Amino acid sequence: MKHCRTILEAKVQDFSALKYGTNPLERMEKLLEEVSELDEAVIAYQKSPTKKNFEKFKDELGDSLFVLISLVGIYGTNIGELMENTMYKIKMRETDKNYKR
């Protein structure tokens, strides 16, 4: 199935390319930073599920998704295609224990 990038994907990718460039290694560094902050936010919310901690979690999750979506665009693919492939892979692993991709 052929997927096109969504309007939101296009907005994020275009904004990110203008603001941060299209160097995938720099974007990966940023992703690692954001995922580390997301990890801290998840731990904080699990320890103390306050509104403030939940808002911090959402903020960090959004930052991580932003960087991921920018990487999707840098490599010329789209979220729909990636998710379809991932769901297929998961289903195949469940039904065929010898499945390798």
Image: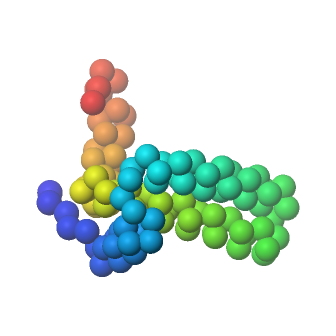
**Quarter of the view holding residue 2:** bottom left
Residue 17 to residue 96: above or below: below
**Taking 60 as reference, is 41 left or right?**
right
Residue 42 appears in view: no
The residue drawn where x is 31% and y is 57% is: 74
**Image quadrant where one finds the N terminus:** bottom left
Tell which of 37 and 100 is nearer to you: 37
Q: Quadrant of residue 52?
A: bottom right
Q: Is residue 55 above or below residue 39?
A: below
The residue drawn where x is 57% and y is 48% is 32
Percent of width and height locating residue 12: 39, 72
In the displayed structure image, the side of residue 84 where residue 94 appears, left or right: right
Looking at the image, which residue is at 54% across and 59% down? 64
Q: Is residue 80 visible?
A: yes
To which quarter of the image does residue 45 belong?
Answer: bottom right
Residue depicted at 34% across the width and 24% down the height: 97
Left or right side of 2 for 30: right
Name the outermost residue toward the top: 98
Q: Nearer the viewer, residue 92 or 61?
A: 61
Quadrant containing the C terminus in the rendered view: top left
Vertical comparison of 22 with 95: above or below: below
**Residue 33: x, y in percent?**
61, 52
Which residue is more in the foreground, 14 or 43? 14
> Which residue lies most toward the left here?
2
